Image (spheres, helix red, strand yellow):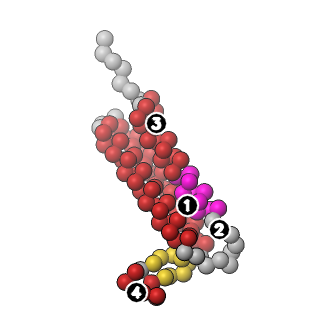
Amino acid sequence: MTPKPKTYFHDRLILLILSINTFLAAALILYALLSLSDNSAVYIREYRSNLGLDGYAAGGIKDIVAFAIFGIIVYVFQLYASTRIYHIRKHLSLMILLITMVIYIFALLVINALLSLR
């Protein structure tokens, strides 16, 4: 009797990494949206260290909301790509999820740095 192949949502390692990514995506979205205080606030959009004091570029609310939209887009893409590739190569599907985890960690670090400077 041959073992029945696992489906995507029955694989424990996939579910663990997907749960971590879900938490990181929710943290990024909530951190971006809860940091919006008022419509007239000016946020730092980017910082270029080679420009000295002129390295700060001001932005608005839409630049912070872009982080939340980025979190949603990355989550949907990683879920779509990972489920499509799982039946072909399980390890490649895991790599997609792990790279997404790294992307979320970097995005949280960036938005924290930008919001702490305002």
Distance between mark 2 and mark 1 Cα atoms: 12 Å
Whichever of callouts 4 and 2 sits on the residue coming sooner in the sequence is 2
Residue 103 is at least partly visible in this image: yes
Give the vertical position of 117 relative to 9 (above or below).
Answer: below
Distance between mark 4 and mark 2 Cα atoms: 27 Å
Crowding at dot 4, Cα within 10 Å, few <14 / some 14-19 / many 20+, comes out as few
Residue 81 is at least partly visible in this image: no
Distance between mark 1 and mark 4 Cα atoms: 28 Å
**Camera-nearest label, 4 or 2:** 4
Image mark for residue 68: 1
Q: Which residues are magenta?
A: 25-34
Distance between mark 3 and mark 1 Cα atoms: 23 Å
Q: Residue 27, image x and y in percent?
A: 56, 54
Whichever of callouts 1 and 4 sits on the residue coming sooner in the sequence is 4
- Residue carrying label 2: 36
Give the vertical position of 35 relative to 17 (above or below).
Answer: below
Whichever of callouts 4 and 3 sits on the residue coming sooner in the sequence is 3
**Camera-nearest label, 1 or 4:** 4
Which amino acid, mark 4? Leu
Furthest residue toward right:
38
- Residue carrying label 4: 51
Image mark for residue 15: 3
The structure residue drawn at horizontal position 35% and vertical position 24%, both measured from the top left corner, is: 5
